[in-house]
Structure formats: structure tokens, C-alpha cells
Image: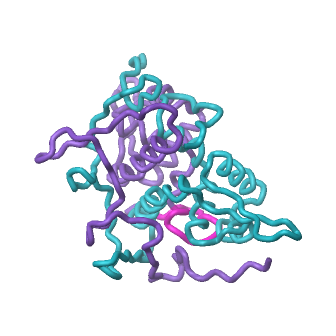
Chain colours: A purple, B cyan
Amino acid sequence: MTPPPATPPPGRPCSIAAALQVLGEKWALLAVRELFYGNHRFEQIVRNTGAPRDRLTARLRALEEAGVVERRAYSERPLRYEYHLTEAGHDLAPLAQSLLAWGDRWLLPEPPAVLHHHVADHPDHPLDAAWTCRTCGHDVGSADLTLEVRSPGWNHQGPLPPVPS
Amino acid sequence: MTPPPATPPPGRPCSIAAALQVLGEKWALLAVRELFYGNHRFEQIVRNTGAPRDRLTARLRALEEAGVVERRAYSERPLRYEYHLTEAGHDLAPLAQSLLAWGDRWLLPEPPAVLHHHVADHPDHPLDAAWTCRTCGHDVGSADLTLEVRSPGWNHQGPLPPVPS
């Protein structure tokens, strides 16, 4: 469990806003993408994302402070570090894959690359991923959800006063 | 099908980067969150996100150009618009939910609010969402995927030349 961000985001208290406080700058998620792809060194991440070096440095530091990545020394002289995903970082896989799936579907001018999924009893099949409720086995749409607010400080949806028109 | 972004993102050609070109500024996804919550008017979105008005205006315009939101007039005199998600916008539900789940798990200092899922044969159960492969029914992790590149222009992962160390 990482500490919450030092500065709460403005607006509605919400885990989406808190997550975007950590991840909501595209270089952050592109750096995470490279770590998923096995590119752990700063120069590789710069090259593969196109990020300006200073902004990438700042984002990697913020990701480290948020507990999403960790630095590991790979050279003693000179002392050099590479970046690895923590457990919280690996847990971003659904987010990265839902971004990929959405971009493939809505933005891609050409047939997308295909992700293949491997499990013991179903080797090598094209990934057909969906956000699914484990309890009932159905896909989760946006229209069939309701929200129970347990903690008034973290009210995702609840009644905000109407805005005067 | 919306047109691809006018300026291709730098770095590795990739649907994640293309998606972040549209969505990768936190006010964009927070505006989308408000539209999911049924708040369609500019003043509501400003209030609930805390976004600076000028940046929110710019993000909503970009989302409209990318085909994620559309404007609908709700008043003739004076002429006023509200914002609604298009089909591409509604298709961001898994992304928003994966952000919410990650923030709930890793950033929340208190017990999270609970989303309830409703389907015909399983009314009113807590949502236990997972990114699942429809073909095999298993959860999708990051380690059990491989990539087949169909189009060299959109190489998500493929071999980039090694970076000199």
C-alpha cells in the first residue's frame, strides 16, 4: 500500500482522479508501457517513447515516489540504475491493455497488431479481452452499475449540489 | 471510425500512444468520467473536476474532434450546448473502470466506495471486475501475452535497434 498523493486532486474526491494524479500525463503511461515491454533503461525509454528527457526524468521520479516503479542498480562503476515495475505497477496491465484495445478500435488506420494469449489449456489464441465481473461472468458495461458510497470523503458519484444554470 | 490524430505521437508507433494523444491529459478523462455520471453541462464538469475553464474547453474541443464526445443544443435562446459521449466515448468504460479499480486498490486511504453490478440473473452484487479473455475465460496478465505485428507501421512492441549503453 503506497501513501496517497500528497496533494489531493481538485474536484470530486475519486479514485479515478487520484490515479490520474499519478498516471495522468502521457509520458508516465508510455514509460510504464516500455517497462511492460522489458525496456528498463532510461535511454531505451527515451528512444521508444519520444519523451523529452527532463519530463521523463520527472515522471519516473513521480512514479517511483508513488510506488509504481523502483530503481535497481545494474552497474556499480559508474553507478547506473534501471527501472522496474513494482506490484502496483504490474497491476496497471488491465489499464494498459484497455488503452491499447480502445486505440486499436477507434484510432488505428490499419489492421491492428494482434495480442495472443496463452494459458495452459488454450495455447496461442488471439486475445479477446473484456472487462468482466467475476461474480456473474458477464461483461461490465457502464449502464448496469450503481455505486454505494462507504466513505463520504471518497464519493465517486454521489449527490453534488446542482449547479445554477 | 474516427480519423487518426493529425500529428502522430513521437516514439514507437502504438495504439496506446495514439489513445493517450487523445486522452492523455487528466482533464480529458475526468470530463469523460463526468459524462458517464450523467453530468453533461460545462458548469457541472468544471465544478466536479476542478479543471481550469480554459483547459477544460480545450480538452472538450479535442475530444469532440477525436469523435469521443458530441455537442447537443439544449437551449435555443441563448444557444447552449451540452456534451454527450459518442459510441467511441462509451467504449471508454473499461478504461475508466480499470483506473477506478487501480486507484481503489493502490491509492485509497479509506475503504473504497463499492460498485454494484446488475444483470438479469444476478441482481445487485458487488462488482468484482477483471480483465478477462473471452476466448478462454481466464484473467489476462501481462506475462502470458505475445504480439503478432501485422502492420509494420503500427509496431507495438517489435524489434527496435538496441540502444548503445
Q: In the image, which residues are magenta? A: A3-18
Q: Using the image, determine if residue A48 lies above or below residue A116.
A: above
Of B6 and A82, nearer the camera is B6
Q: Using the image, determine if residue A67 lies above or below residue B18.
A: below
Residue positioned most to the left: A121
Q: Using the image, determine if residue B16 lies above or below residue A89.
A: above
Tell whether position A12 is magenta.
yes
- Left or right: A100 with respect to B20? left
The residue at 34%/36% (across/down) is A114
Of B77 and A86, nearer the camera is B77
Q: Position of residue A160 (x, y in %)?
A: 64, 80
Q: Position of residue A113 (x, y in %)?
A: 38, 33
Q: Dividing the picture into quarters, in which one does residue A146 lie?
A: bottom left
Q: Can residue B98 be spotted in the picture?
A: yes
Q: Position of residue A69 (x, y in %)?
A: 40, 46
The residue at 35%/72% (across/down) is B127
Q: Quadrant of the C terminus of chain A?
A: bottom right
Residue positioned most to the right: B77
Q: Dividing the picture into quarters, in which one does residue A76 lie?
A: top left
Tell whether position A16 is magenta.
yes
Q: Magenta span: helix, strand or loop, mainly?
A: loop
Q: Quadrant of the N terminus of chain A?
A: bottom left
Q: Can residue B144 be spotted in the picture?
A: no
The residue at 57%/71% (across/down) is B37
Tell me how many marks there are: 0
- Left or right: B153 with respect to B162? right
The residue at 70%/81% (across/down) is A162
Q: Position of residue B131 (x, y in %)?
A: 32, 56
Of B28 and A49, nearer the camera is B28
